[in-house]
Amino acid sequence: MLTIKNLHKKFGKLKVLDGVSFDIPTSGTVAVLGPNGSGKTTIMKCVLGMVIPNDGDITLNDTSILKQWDYRREIGYLPQIAQFPDNLSVQELINMIKDLRSVPANELELIELFELHPFLSKKLSNLSGGTKQKVNIVLTFMFDCPLYILDEPTAGLDPISMIRLKELIDKEKKKNKTIIITTHIMSLVEELADEIFFLLDGKIHFRGPVDQLKKETKQEDLEHAIANILTND
Amino acid sequence: MIKILKYSFYDLIRSRWSYVYLLFYLVIGFALLFLNNNLSKAIITLMNVVVVLVPMIGTIFGVMYYYSSREFTELLLAQPIKRRTIFLGQYLGIAMSLSFSLLVGLGIPFLAYGLMQSSEIWNFGLLLVVGTFLTFIFVALAFAISLRNENKIKGFGYGILLWLFMAVIYDGLFLILLVTFDDYPLDKYTLVASFLNPIDLSRILILLKLDISALLGYTGALFQQYFGSGVGMVMSLGSLVLWTVIPMWMIARRSGKKDF
């Protein structure tokens, strides 16, 4: 479904992506892992067209997405840090995004799920970090997209909301959707990911299912397996 | 584009600063009219206010809006919308809401004074046209500058410097050059130079229409001499259009290349 070919990106002198290539199959959950600053967010932003790569190509369903915009209909994106216009209320923001996309949305169900009703008329600037993240999740999942890109989806969430998010992701997975996740929470990866992409020094260092990573590094749990990759180099 | 424009426009119209700006024009409009008791004089005084103040407010609002709406912009960038549409939509939203404040703020006092029965209506109309042009020009320049500078303070600084240069320094430099190279024929050079500053251009345009040769100054007089009032006005209006279109084109170009 999504193919990334030889992607390069430099920010000034800092080389973030140095020839990343991979393809993500239709349906399934992929976890993009890597140490801080390894370029996880940059890859996601390249796919979204927010960061423009220096070299390489990205194709979605066999058409290049570089310099295109309409393909973003197919993507639900959950940004890392929930940043919203401060002077809007939650309801206004949801309505605005619905209006901009002009496709049907099932926001009511999600508002119910994350118990956002009491906050609908509150200004976004007055919300706590976790509540903002819930709004963020609603905005991402309210449209029916074949591809979801989730950058640190659990940031600031309480345990109950985290369980609900996992259920939500599971539900989308069962509908044969593709989900790309970056996170530092390994339990989430173990529970959800079919495949892991491990990014290091701007390249894909490891690719395969969780079990294979554990086997290769001879570690019992994922956290130690990851630490093993990092210390062996 | 219309949707983005609509959201930016309403966002600004709801903000306190739009009302302050509107109120300022209302107050100054009424004050000038009832103190001068003369439409023509009020228009001349207003011209001097408009050609300096409108670019300044345009620059400040443009830069401030760009930086304060960065979160909003990032949200939009992940939606199926063209980048150019996002930035041009926001730009038009600000420019239109500022122009709205200007038109309503000055329009009400002049209408109340009985502008409609006066022969000054065309001169006043031109003042509003020029004010609107200056708003569109300087908001576009401010947006183009902000798009090039990640750092808010730098963007703000460059914006204000540009305004200061066009509104104040340009005239001074111009005069110094004229005095220094007094012995040379400087007509054509002067003429070209006045096209390079939208503030000067606006001033000349209004003065040509008002037909007050005493206030025209050196460049204005040259304009009149070279083109006559009619052609001079068309020329200067034309270059104001260019001054609007070129920064808009810069916004469109830069917005396609930037990383967010």
Image (tube, rainbow, N blue to C red):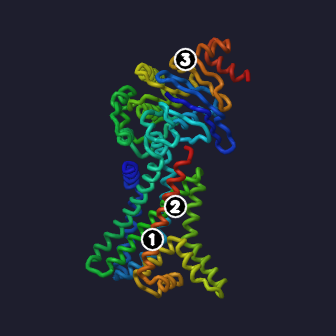
The answer to which image quadrant residue B130 occupies is bottom left
Q: CA distance from mark 3 to mark 2?
A: 51 Å
**Marks 3 and 2 in Cβ contact (< 8 Å):** no
Cα separation between marks 2 and 1: 18 Å
Q: Quadrant of residue A144?
A: top left
Q: What residue is disc 3 on?
A: A190
Q: CA distance from mark 3 to mark 1?
A: 65 Å
Out of A223 and B241, give the one closest to the viewer: B241
Tell if the residue under mark 2 belongs to the same chain as the one under mark 1.
Answer: yes
Identify the residue under disc 1.
B238
| Lateral position of residue B32 relative to residue A162, left or right | left
Rate crowding at label 1 as few (under 14), some (14 to 19) or many (20 or more) other CA atoms within 10 Å. few
Extreme residue in the front direction? A62
Other residues around mark 2 within 10 Å, as few (<14) / some (14–19) / many (≥20): many
Where residue B42 sits in the image (x, y, percent)? 38, 79
Residue B78: % across, % down: 47, 39
The chain that hosts pointer 1 is B
Label total for image: 3
- At numbered mark 1, what does the secondary structure look like: helix, strand or loop? helix
Q: Nearer the viewer, mark 2 or mark 1?
A: 1
Query: Where residue A183 sits in the image (x, y, percent)?
Result: 56, 27
Identify the image quadrant of the C terminus of chain B: top right
**Residue nearest the viewer, comparing A9 with B42:** A9
Q: Secondary structure at mark 3?
A: helix
Pointer 2 residue: B141
Can marks 3 and 1 be said to lie on one chain?
A: no
> At label 3, which amino acid type do we have?
Glu
Give the mark nearest the N terminus, 2 or 1.
2
